[in-house]
Amino acid sequence: MKTIMLKTAKRKYSKITVIAVLIFGIGLLGFTGKVRYPADSNISGKSKIINIETKASFPENKGNNTDISPMPVYGNWRNFSTEDGLSDDHTYCVKIDGERVLVGTHEGLAVYEEGKWKTYTTTDGLAHNGIIAIDVSEQTGDVWLGTMGGLSRWSGGIFENFTQMNSGMPNDLIYSVICDGKDVWVATGGGAGRFDTFTKQWNIFTEKNAPMHEPWTYGICEGDGKIFIAAWGGVLWNTQRKLKNSGIMSIRMGIWKLTFSQMMV
């Protein structure tokens, strides 16, 4: 009796194994099939990959399969690296400022102007060489740099630095910075901050006075008369730019919203 049951079980598992192998084989054939493009596509089997940095051409599809073509490259691109004068190949942010390009790198501020790169580091007065965020004030033309060790204002060729110790900024690790009129907003590892360039005072927003799970804030921007803050646990926005730290907090439609009861001029 046991022998009959064992034979029956073996036949059953053998059938399952055969079915599984067939299914796997069909799926494998589907993944390895030829790639075909629409008839009106400009891609052909004789296409070439263009290295846009060196302008060199490399033949493609040397094998027998002429139906597979390379992905076309759109636009005219130019690459910059340390070989071209860039301070470091690790770049975090970029900002266009008139006729010049400002790039935040791991080794300082790289400025591209009139076809040449120039680098500014801590030896020139920068707060920290690692620059994560850049913005330019429309009112004054000052360049504000969020670094891994403080906030730097570059004005008239001189760097002025703001840290927790010398100004009361929320945290020295700055992920984002924007200029909004006379105010400068920062998203830091210790909360969001608003710096009034007239009064030289900071307003700080953390989990203690805003609906955040933790003080970490990673992005900040302005739009539609509001300030939006990307915080750990949700997105916060302020409907009034001129504010003090005290206010009433509410939640609407799953997005954090702050409304403030006091204002300042």
Image (cartoon, grey):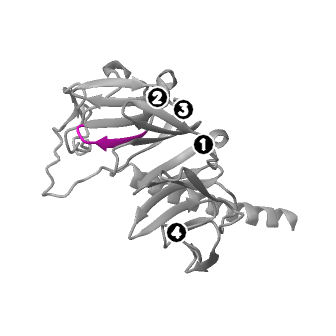
Q: Secondary structure at mark 2?
A: strand
Q: Earlier in the sequence, mark 3 or mark 2?
A: 2
Q: Nearer the viewer, residue 79 or 51?
A: 79
Query: Could you give the CA–CA distance between mark 4 and mark 2, rounded to whole angstroms?
Result: 31 Å
- Label 4: which secondary element: strand
Q: Quadrant of the N terminus?
A: bottom right
Q: Amino acid at mark 3?
A: Ala
Q: Residues within 10 Å of mark 4 (few under 14, many from 20)?
A: some
Q: Position of residue 103 (x, y in %)?
A: 38, 35
Answer above or below: position of 90 versus 185.
above
Q: Position of residue 162 (x, y in %)?
A: 56, 40
Q: Badge 1 local density, few (<14 within 10 Å), some, or many (20+)?
A: many
Specify the quadrant of the image occupied by residue 39.
bottom left
**How far apart are the two marked residues, 3 and 4, measured between alpha carbons?**
29 Å
Q: Which residue is mark 4?
A: 237
For the residues bearing labels 2 and 1, Cβ distance under 8 angstroms: no
Residue that protrudes farthest toward the right in the picture: 2
**Callout in the foreground (3, 4):** 3
The residue identified by callout 2 is 108
What is the magenta range?
A: 93-99
Report which residue position mark 3 lands on: 127
